[in-house]
Amino acid sequence: MTPDIHDIGGAPVIIGAGLAGLLTALHLAPQPVVLLSRTPLGTEASSTLAQGGLAASLGEDDTPELHLTDTLAAGDGHCDEQMARRVIEAAPKAIENLIRLGVPFDRSLDGRLRLGLEAAHSRRRIVHAAGDATGRELFRALLGVARRTHSITIMEGMTALRLVVSEGSIVGLLAVLHGGVFALPTRRVVLATGGIGGLFCDTTNPLSSFGHGLALAACAGAELADLEFVQFHPTALDGPRRPMSLVSEAVRGEGAVLTDEDGRRFLADTPGAELASRDVVARAISDQLAVGHRVYLDARHCLGQKFARRFPAIDAICKQAGIDPAVEPIPVRPAAHYHMGGVAVDAEGRSSVSGLWACGEVACTGLHGANRLASNSLAEAVATAVWVAASVAGSCAGWQWPRLPATIPVRPDPSPIRPLVSKALGIVRNGKSMRDTVATVLPIAVGETAAADPALVTLLMAIAALRREESRGSHYRSDFPGRDAAALPSRLTLCTAFENAVTISWQTSERSC
């Protein structure tokens, strides 16, 4: 199939129209930009599902230094301290900008922003909108502004298939729309494609979030970092619905407790109890489930009849499942939720490939380390979008068009890969299972089926997890349960993929945390 070349005048292209993509496009205005969304806007963006808020040191008893301390502790010795400090210090100003753009954050009676508490935070510093619908309200406000911004061209229903690289630089991309393949010539591409939760059977992410941006970046030769670190949210609503509905950490912040079917509070003696870091809580719940217990989140005593007013979206989701949180506990289980790894980027969001940037969950800035602190993800997206947009705007425009790839990939489908990922890269991992998965997905990853790109992402994640022979943050190995103080941050690059073989380069690098 020969692609139709669609001349966009060399405008930068943003792949992904969630919070990170929308904000990057808005910060580029009035410079023309093309925004690609593979579905109708808002229908499959992780941003719209976010119940938590944005973390920022806004309280009178809080400081950026305290926020930084909590972030570094959650990251388990794996954060980039310089980057973490930069994002944290930028977060309050980023929230002010969102307010100017029309985001209706919740406020107390005196007009101040209402601040919530979430796990591993030492202060109330979580800003919400519409209670537990922060992501939806953020997206609604920003989409409205984007649609009114004439410099932003939105292409809905268009899926990027491959980045085109010439002499180490981006020169365009291939995309599909309604079965037709299009070539978009550009020297500037921003990945804002979200995470990898859709590779797992149990996830709170859209099922299409399989690491699309990672596959695009890997095939373009970009460095990827920390792929082994996947955060599982401890409390997704335990039921048949996929993606799973999230029961926000803020519910535990209000005093809800975790119990088994007999009412036993199994985290009572754990430091931090229900508000311990997410990896600790998720493993504790997983251990209970593994021996046949059910796990419940009980908010009856701390919220009771106030639950619906404080958490209206969660209340509605629970009642749709036949559960009234005011009078009965909520069945929960962990689910894949956030990827700390991603495309390795510098302080301006630039990847190792000239002309390629990444923003949001698809990027690995080093802020989150081995375990993301709750609500730091939205704060990272709104802070870094400013820097990415400035870097893109200051780079060379124009375009050239080289010879197109001989084979055009098909639209990806992660469904055949999910059982493999869930077994090998779940909350507790071991070397044998991961090695078996590498052997299984390798021939798929180098093939030409719809499962190839999801299999490639799985392959890279499994190799990264195999190389990290320790347990740290969200990465827990039953065969290496101890923490290795000498272990360093890791990066890998897909060099070639051909005839049932791949060549991957691996390196470690120092970080300041």
Image (tube, grey):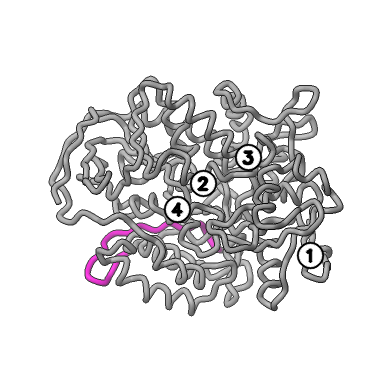
Q: What residue do we see at 35% from left, 46% from top?
A: 352
For the residue labelled by badge 2, is the local secondary structure a helix, a strand or a loop?
helix
Residue 46, numbered label: 2
Q: Nearer the viewer, mark 3 or mark 4?
A: 3
Q: Taking 159 as reference, is 64 above or below it?
A: above
Task: Classify residue 183 as left or right of residue 242.
Answer: left
| Callout 4 secondary element | loop
Q: CA distance from mark 4 to mark 1?
A: 31 Å
Q: Which mark is residue 494?
A: none
Q: Please say if the residues under marks 4 and 1 sit with CB atoms less than 8 Å apart.
A: no
Residue located at (58% from left, 29% from top): 94
Q: Along the polypeptide, which appears first: circle 2 or circle 4?
A: 2
Kind of residue indicated by mark 4? Ser
Amino acid marked by disc 1: Thr
Secondary structure at numbered mark 1: strand
Q: Is residue 311 magenta?
A: no
Residue position marked by numbered label 3 in the rendering: 133
Q: Which residues are magenta?
A: 487-503
Q: Earlier in the sequence, mark 3 or mark 4?
A: 3
Real-space Cα separation, disc 1 to disc 2, in angstroms = 28 Å
Outermost residue toward the right? 301
Q: Residues within 10 Å of mark 3 (few under 14, many from 20)?
A: many
Q: Quadrant of residue 312?
A: top right
Q: Quick one: label 2, few (<14), some, or many (20+) residues within 10 Å?
A: many
In the picture of the structure, the residue carrying the numbered disc 4 is 209
Q: Which mark is residue 259?
A: 1
Residue 91, percent across and down? 61, 32
